[in-house]
Amino acid sequence: MNTVAKFGLLVGCLMLAGAMLALAQENPPSLTQVVALDECDPVTFNAALGPDFCKNVTLGAFTTLSNLFAEAAAGTPDPNWDFEPDTVHLKRGTTLSVVDQGGEPHTFTEVAHFGGGFIPGLNAPGEDTVPECAGGFSNIAVARTRILQASHMDITGLKKGEHHFQCCIHPWMRVKVEVR
Ligand SMILES: [Cu+2]
């Protein structure tokens, strides 16, 4: 290959690399993240629910198991049990990645209408279990929406429109997803 041809090839390669870079910048990886948070107290949770149920790094910012139930029964559920953000806007085709950064398991369950979960003592006064949470983890449809501590679940193929997701354990953990 002569020098002119080599130079032409080099320019071609550089142009291709430039075009690919521009494309990558226009189309960032289509992934949106939701984080599940809680402040379960390992001492009281694990005494009642078994070792390793709550594996939290609380640094003192914890809620005991009895307080969590008391707050829910009073209609003022603990705000530290939370999905963040509360509303997500995404383009169709975007992956929704839900990461559990709390200390205990949660579920990210799509429901027609927000409502109670499968543990009556954690539901708001007078709130019934929504059909999508019924049966708890003995229902495979519910169990497959479970997210364990330090793991994540990716949701793809969400249709255009509004979707509602909630935790079937802590039903005040709610996210509205708008797909356009
Ligand atoms: Cu939860």
Image (cartoon, helix red, strand yellow):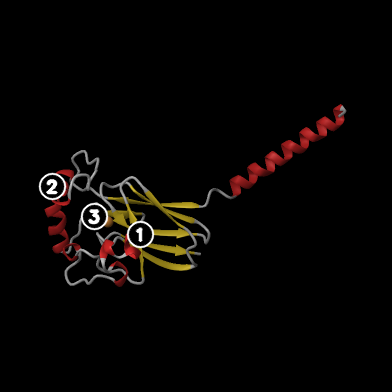
Side (left or right) of 142 relative to 45: right
Label 3 secondary element: loop
Q: Amino acid at mark 1?
A: Thr
Spatial CA distance of label 1 from label 3 is 22 Å
Residue 113: image x %, image y %? 33, 71
Which of pointers 2 and 3 lies earlier in the amino acid sequence?
2
Residue under label 2, please give it: 47
Q: Nearer the viewer, residue 2 or 89?
A: 2
Residue at 49%, 67% in the rendered image: 159
What's the residue type where badge 3 is placed?
Pro
User: Crowdedness of circle 3 by 10 Å Cα count: few (<14), some, many (20+)?
Assistant: few
- Is 98 left, or right, of 179 in this rendering? left
In this figure, which residue is indicated by the disc labeled 3? 79
Cβ of mark 2 under 8 Å from ligand 1: the answer is no
Q: Circle 2: is it few (<14), some (14-19), or many (20+) Cα within 10 Å? A: few
Q: Which residue is mark 1?
A: 145
Task: Give above or below for 176 relative to 38.
Answer: below
> Foreground residue, 173 or 110?
110
Quadrant where the N terminus sits is: top right
Q: Residue at x 68, y 40 (%)?
A: 18
Q: Position of residue 161 (x, y in %)?
A: 46, 69
Task: Give the foreground label among 1 and 3.
Answer: 1
